[in-house]
Image: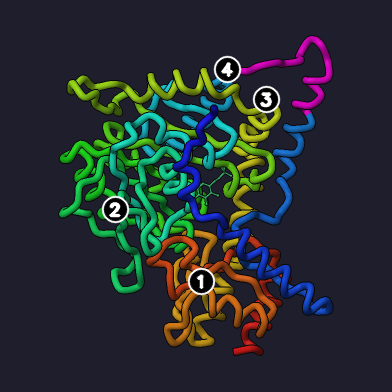
Amino acid sequence: MALVNEHFLKLPNNYLFADIAKKVNVFKVTHPKNKLISLGIGDVTQPLCPAVVDAMHKAVDEMAVKESFRGYGPEQGYDFLREAILKNDFRPRGIHLDIDEVFVNDGAKSDTGNFQELIRWDNSIGVTDPIYPVYIDSNVMIGRAGVLQEGKWSNVVYMPCTAENNFTPQIPEQQHVDVIYLCYPNNPTGTVISREELKKWVNYALKNDILIFYDAAYQAYITDPDIPHSIYEIRGAKKCAIEFRSFSKTAGFTGVRCGYTIVPKEVTAATLNGERISLNHLWNRRQCTKFNGTSYISQKAAEATYSPEGKEQVRGTVDYYMQNAAKMRTTLAKLGFQVYGGINAPYIWMKTPEGMDSWHFFDELLYGANVVCTPGVGFGPSGEGYVRFTAFGSHESTAEALRRIENWK
Ligand SMILES: *Cc1c(COP(=O)(O)O)cnc(C)c1O
């Protein structure tokens, strides 16, 4: 008899976006004439830039002839892309990494979910709250998170990030953790971490032998020169941090699929006997067994984001979204809402008026303004009383959504 992994059964049945879709469907069926605008799910809407499209066409043509056809590529990714990553994303920031510390993947979701396989099931994790759901859910699946009680997992240490603490998580001095997940710029709050604050986390990790899983999927949206793009800008981080990156939000690759993970050779975890094991070596072993690389076409597309034209075009799209963010910030603030984020990230995090709960506000906005947002509580208990708006819409639909909110309020 095959016994099921019952840890999966602990996960609440409905995924946040499935709940939203259900409510939206009910609205559509009961209001067939009203056209909704979604500022909900965090997906991009602008097409791929010309440099990327050209590179993909060329890659397809190469695949079409015998002489340049390619089958399985290296599990770690092609060197042309790994080299371009080092040359463009790290060296200009004074970060020197080896090419075999770069692992190209099919997007950051897979690796942020999978990397926890390298640590024992009984390690404890700490997360900022609210949080990208993948981090906790992937730990639930392996039995590391404990049980869900009143919206919190029993073996997870939550570090609240709210308006009250200026969205700055406090180091959990009183509780034991082995692994900390940090995501900056943050999804869902759109807030960032300063160099000083990030330094505190790295020093805390080094002092207490803690691993940091750092998700920098939104680093391309940073506009403030004092905000770090990579955790490796902080001295010592190469000893304690893994960094996840993605082309999804940077260059509209949510459908193309390509990202990468940096696993420095210095990062280790201990065996029960106290022997230190290189996570770079372990991750390589894991990838060679379970992953067969992301497609050549996707990797060529990713490489093209680093060409001079590619860089400029990608920048153009990021700027386009950030114009939405700026407009959303100012309009919502003018209407009297408390808004956060949206300066170094494509998300606006908004406090609901008069302490209304997230889902209640979601319904009011849906039926009152015909605009879809994401209820903050879906990202964790500290998200209650907030909603998230994305800046990934078109200028037209974003402006129209803001007009509707203005008329409704
Ligand atoms: C969108 C997103 C990612 C990227 O996911 P991909 O699998 O690369 O598309 C990673 N982390 C966070 C926090 C995100 O919001």
Amino acid carrying mark 3 in the image? Tyr
Q: Residue 15's spot in the image, x, y percent? A: 56, 56
What is the CA distance from the residue labelled 4 to the residue labelled 3?
Answer: 10 Å
Find disc 2 in the rendering and name its residue: 157
Residue at 74 percent of width and 32 percent of height = 56
Which element is circle 3 on? helix
The residue stretch that appears in magenta: 58-74
Give the crowd class for mark 3: few <14, some 14-19, many >=20 residues within 10 Å.
many
Amino acid carrying mark 4 in the image? Pro
Q: Is the CB–ligand 1 distance for label 1 below 8 Å?
A: no
Give the crowd class for mark 2: few <14, some 14-19, many >=20 residues within 10 Å.
many
Quarter in which the C terminus is drawn: bottom right
Decide which of tag 3 and tag 2 comes sooner along the chain: 2
Check contact, mark 4 vs mark 3: CB within 8 A: no
Q: Residue 149's spot in the image, x, y percent? A: 36, 60
What is the CA distance from the residue labelled 1 to the residue labelled 4?
Answer: 42 Å
Residue at 29 percent of width and 38 percent of height = 123
Find disc 3 in the rendering and name its residue: 296
Decide which of tag 4 and tag 3 comes sooner along the chain: 4
Marks 3 and 1: which is nearer the front? 1
Amino acid carrying mark 1 in the image? Val
Find disc 4 in the rendering and name its residue: 74
What is the CA distance from the residue labelled 2 to the residue labelled 4?
Answer: 37 Å
Decide which of tag 1 and tag 2 comes sooner along the chain: 2
Q: Is residue 68 magenta?
A: yes
